[in-house]
Image (cartoon, grey):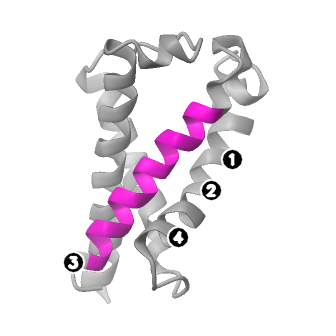
Amino acid sequence: MFRKISSAFSAGALGGLANSLAVWFFGVAGISAAFGVTLTPRLTPPWLYPRIIWGGLWGFLFLIPVMRGSILVRGFIYSLGPTFVMLFIILPKMGKGVYGLSLGTLMPVLVVIFSFIWGIAAAFWFRNSGE
């Protein structure tokens, strides 16, 4: 059981890293700006570390024994949790409004994309860790 728990956490943490790198890349490459979203984080340890840890904690969703088939489906379904928390709790608490609309009207679309990246990376890692 410990192996399964550690696999879930590490899968989520890897997903958190993939998500963070995507958010950062979209910012520096101007993709976020092309969406009309002002999101350009700096890739620094204080920004990155909490995102990896939270990704690891969200990885515990993979312990729920459902959706074991498709990596894409499982990744998308499990990414809905972080998506809703980001849109309805984190962004409003940061003063960015519900859905983070003060960052741009397409911010919710980017949140879905970034969360899906987390979900796919985590689902892929979890499946290939032998679980």
Instruction: Give the structural element (helix, strand or loop) at label 1.
Output: helix
Instruction: Find disc 3 in the rendering and name its residue.
Output: 129
Instruction: Determine the main secondary structure of the stretch shown in magenta.
Output: helix
Instruction: Find disc 2 in the rendering and name its residue.
Output: 81
Tell me the tag on residue 73.
Answer: 4
Q: Which quadrant of the view contains residue 20?
A: top left
Instruction: Give the structural element (helix, strand or loop) at label 3.
Output: loop
Please indicate whether residue 92 sits to the left or right of residue 71 in the image.
right
Name the kind of residue labelled 3 in the image: Ser
Name the kind of residue labelled 1 in the image: Phe
x, y percentage for residue 78? Answer: 55, 64
Q: Residue at x 45, y 74 (%)?
A: 62
Using the image as rendered, state which of residue 79 and residue 30 is in the foreground.
Answer: 30
Instruction: Find disc 1 in the rendering and name its residue.
Output: 84
Using the image as rendered, state which of residue 94 and residue 87 is in the foreground.
Answer: 87
Q: Are marks 3 and 4 in contact (CB under 8 Å)?
A: no
Question: Magenta segment range?
Answer: 109-127
x, y percentage for residue 72? Answer: 46, 66
- Residue at the far front in the pictured view: 34
Name the kind of residue labelled 4 in the image: Val
Q: Residue at x 31, y 82 (%)?
A: 4
Q: Residues within 10 Å of mark 3 (few under 14, many from 20)?
A: some
